[in-house]
């Protein structure tokens, strides 16, 4: 039988040793994580820029990277400051974020969800990125946003236009500055009615994936609400390069308007094919045949050349805007790189500044602090007029540009002209709007 | 009825591209026994010959424009084209407008050179290796070539329009007695079909009616015996590789006004072209041409709304479905020869 000798001295000694043993890991954990994933150590903070560096959107990805690089320069107090002086929030001081110098790592999404998740995961786990931004595809954005939610870092979406990103797939750690399909439809419809009338028969060709569906739904509902009839809507494979088989039957359908819910290479090819088939030279139902491209990208429009002339679409931002923020950004970007920035570059630059500003205002990099600082945040001076980051879905609400392909471009950059700046009220919708239903924001996840 | 006629017309230009690429693939396989997965890249290189030639024709120098400014508000410049300085304004403008057809003259020597360099520099070292090795090395080469193109030209499509006179479309419906505007077909696609027919006829005539072609055909049938007769068949086969590269390249040159070229366009055609070769029969030149047009037309017919409504997704699988059926019923393909790729 063993005998237990409990003495006061023995209890104190044992307690001291056990306490020290338990305290060491707690101390180390606090140093490493400070209660959230990748809490910055030392005098730097790492941001992760996840863009398509290879694949069909590589040029758009390259422009996004240029914008990120410029934003980091400005945050660190280098260069001319870009939009920082025009930004209504004055929390940014040009000394990094919260006094820490901003450094960045990059990943290649390849415009594939699995590759994008892998590169984001690597930047979070190996490089210690506290925020991920970038992207040129809604499928990629939705996948990376979900990963960031699980990992406990902030996702500041780049170019993603599907309703789902801040609709059924929204996440508390994810924020989108770019506009969406609903907004395109709501902005375009009145302009189309004013120019082409309310008695039109539309034929939709739609890219067979997430973004295509939401864009078709948005444009259909907006145009049908003003009197247009949709005679047919055909899904086209994402890998399609020659759209002649899909375009040829359009005239036989009795349609007098073709809506191309295509982006990137799909848009370039389908628009080129439609113009080749002479659709725009035809008269149907006593009206001139018309083509509409709901989402324009200047970089992509370049590929379609003169075929974009006179064709309406919408865009998030354009370098020809004359507000002080846009002018400052175009000057800064154009001086550094020799050409004007794209809308993808603009949204990535703005998202980086907004993230940094939120950290400064929150006084922390903790994702929950950043979420709180961004939710309901109203700002101006970043190129889109007065803007609200709505708390309910983390979507930015701002004016939307309706543009038209220029008939006589004066340079290779001068492809689109702004025909209307649609006021934000006209493109605002309720958080529970049917086109955005089915998801829940949830709560912020600080990770660690 | 109109819809079917329209889709058959659509299938002709797709089939033309498939047939031209498959013809080159079959020429290489028939002569050298190499399964060339870089053949799609040759189609793409041809398209970029047209882009390069167009760029050369639009080389310019800048002259200050007194009233204009650039996007930063700095003084802007007018582009003055060298061709218009050298050949006069009208002739220069005509050359720039006709850049795509004119680039055929540029593409032929370039593509033959690329083909010969490819064969002598890399592929000849793999003649006696298994087909799997040949596929791997040529596929790797295709990726290298497309990345090189992407490095210099970017990832975005580059618009390369047809001459002004060929823009627009022909109303077949009105000509055939149907309602106007129901069967329309772009002029350039008619040009492409005609061009493909001429190239295919020229290749067949070259093989059939020239001494060089006769030796090549003899070599394809029995390489060893031709070699024993003292004929340097390897040299002729190298030239055939160059010709096959030129055929693929010309198909690419003339395709540029149909779809703006990008670095990936070769891969888009490669897999389908291999299906065309297998369906036509490995090593059979007429089989490749026949299968090219057949599958092109079937692909177009399967894209009709009525067909998709009946069998959703059929437009994406029709070619492979037909390939399975043909290979089950005719294992050597439509016009395959006994003993080719058979142990």
Image: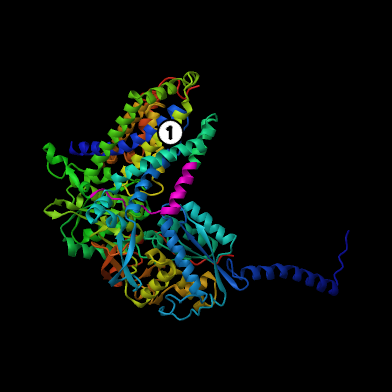
**Secondary structure beneath label 1:** helix
Residue depicted at x 42% and y 73% = A332
Q: Position of residue A302 (x, y in %)?
A: 33, 58
Left or right, residue B130 beside residue A374 = right
Q: Mark 1 falls within which chain?
A: B
Segment colored magenta: B141-163
Q: Is residue A135 visible?
A: no
Whole-percent x, y for residue A138 in the image: 40, 57
Residue A90 or A375: which is nearer the viewer? A90
Question: For residue A377: magenta?
Answer: no
Quadrant location, the N terminus of chain B: top left
Viewer-proximal residue, B55 or B62? B62
Residue at the farthest front position: B86
Q: Is residue B126 among the parts visible in the rendering?
A: yes
The answer to which quarter of the image holds residue A327 is bottom left
Q: Nearer the viewer, residue A444 or A120?
A: A120
């Amino acid at each position: 039988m063993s005998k237990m000798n409990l003495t006061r001295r023995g209890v104190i000694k044992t307690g001291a040793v056990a306490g020290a043993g338990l305290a060491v890991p707690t101390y180390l954990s606090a140093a490493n994580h400070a209660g959230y994933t990748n809490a910055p150590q030392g005098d730097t903070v790492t941001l992760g820029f996840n863009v398509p560096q290879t694949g069909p959107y590589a040029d758009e990805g390259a422009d996004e990277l240029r914008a990120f690089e410029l934003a980091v320069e400005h945050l660190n107090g280098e260069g001319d400051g870009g939009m920082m002086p025009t930004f209504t929030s004055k929390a940014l001081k040009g000394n990094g974020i919260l006094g820490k110098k901003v450094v960045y790592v990059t990943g290649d999404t390849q415009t594939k969800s699995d590759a994008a998740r892998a590169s984001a995961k690597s930047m979070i786990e190996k490089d210690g990125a506290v925020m991920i931004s970038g992207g040129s595809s809604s499928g990629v954005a939705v996948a990376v946003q979900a990963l960031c939610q699980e990992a406990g870092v902030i996702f500041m979406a780049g170019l993603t236009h599907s309703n789902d990103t801040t609709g059924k797939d929204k996440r508390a750690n994810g924020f989108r500055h770019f506009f969406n399909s609903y907004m395109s439809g709501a902005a375009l419809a009145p302009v189309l009615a004013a120019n082409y009338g309310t008695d039109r028969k539309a034929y939709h060709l739609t890219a067979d994936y997430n973004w295509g569906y939401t864009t078709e739904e948005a444009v259909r509902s907006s145009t049908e609400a003003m009197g247009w009839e949709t005679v047919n809507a055909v899904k086209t494979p994402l890998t399609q390069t020659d759209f002649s088989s899909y375009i040829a039957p359009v005239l036989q359908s009795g349609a007098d308007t073709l809506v191309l819910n295509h982006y990137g290479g799909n848009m370039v090819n389908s628009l080129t094919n439609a113009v080749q088939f002479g659709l725009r030279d035809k008269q149907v139902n006593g009206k001139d045949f018309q083509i509409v491209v709901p989402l324009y990208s200047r970089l992509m429009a370049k590929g379609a050349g003169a075929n974009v002339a006179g064709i309406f679409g919408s865009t998030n931002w354009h370098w020809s805007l004359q507000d002080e923020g846009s002018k400052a950004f175009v000057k800064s970007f154009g001086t550094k790189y020799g050409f004007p920035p794209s809308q993808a570059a603009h949204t990535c630059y703005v998202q980086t500044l907004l993230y940094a500003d939120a950290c400064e205002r929150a006084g922390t990099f903790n994702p929950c602090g950043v979420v709180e600082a961004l939710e309901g945040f109203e700002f101006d001076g970043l190129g889109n007029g007065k803007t609200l980051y709505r708390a309910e879905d983390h979507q930015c609400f701002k004016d939307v540009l309706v543009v038209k392909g220029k008939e006589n471009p004066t340079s290779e950059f001068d492809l689109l002209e702004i025909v209307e700046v649609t006021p934000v009220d006209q493109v605002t919708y309720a958080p529970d709007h049917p086109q955005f239903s089915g998801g829940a924001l949830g709560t912020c996840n600080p990770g660690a | 009825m109109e819809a079917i006629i329209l889709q058959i017309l659509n299938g002709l230009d797709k089939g033309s591209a498939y047939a031209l690429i498959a013809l080159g693939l079959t020429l290489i396989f028939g002569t050298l026994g190499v399964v060339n997965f870089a053949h799609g890249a040759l189609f793409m290189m041809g398209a970029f010959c047209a882009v390069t030639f167009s760029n050369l024709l639009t080389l310019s120098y800048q002259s200050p424009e007194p009233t204009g400014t650039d996007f930063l508000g700095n003084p802007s410049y007018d582009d003055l084209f060298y061709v218009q300085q050298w050949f006069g304004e009208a002739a220069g403008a005509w050359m720039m407008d006709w850049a795509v057809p004119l680039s055929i003259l540029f593409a032929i020597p370039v593509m033959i050179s690329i083909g010969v360099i490819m064969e002598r520099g890399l592929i000849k070292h793999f003649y006696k290796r298994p087909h799997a090795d040949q596929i791997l090395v040529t596929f790797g080469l295709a990726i290298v070539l497309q990345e090189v193109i992407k490095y210099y030209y970017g990832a975005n499509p580059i618009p390369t329009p047809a001459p002004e006179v060929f823009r627009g479309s022909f109303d077949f419906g009105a000509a055939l007695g149907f309602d106007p505007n129901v069967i329309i077909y772009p002029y350039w696609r008619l040009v492409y079909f005609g061009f493909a027919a001429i190239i295919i006829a020229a290749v067949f005539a070259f093989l059939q009616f020239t001494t060089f072609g006769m030796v090549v055909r003899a070599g394809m049938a029995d390489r060893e015996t031709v070699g024993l007769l003292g004929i340097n068949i390897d040299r002729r086969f190298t030239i055939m590789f160059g010709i096959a590269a030129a055929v693929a390249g010309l198909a690419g040159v003339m395709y540029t006004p149909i779809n703006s070229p990008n670095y990936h366009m070769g891969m888009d055609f490669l897999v389908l072209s291999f299906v065309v070769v297998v369906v036509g029969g490995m090593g059979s030149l007429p089989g490749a041409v026949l299968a090219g047009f057949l599958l092109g037309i079937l692909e177009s017919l399967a894209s009709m709304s009525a067909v998709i409504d009946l069998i959703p997704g059929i437009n994406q699988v029709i070619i492979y479905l037909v390939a399975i059926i043909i290979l089950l019923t005719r294992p050597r393909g439509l016009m395959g020869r006994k003993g080719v790729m058979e142990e």
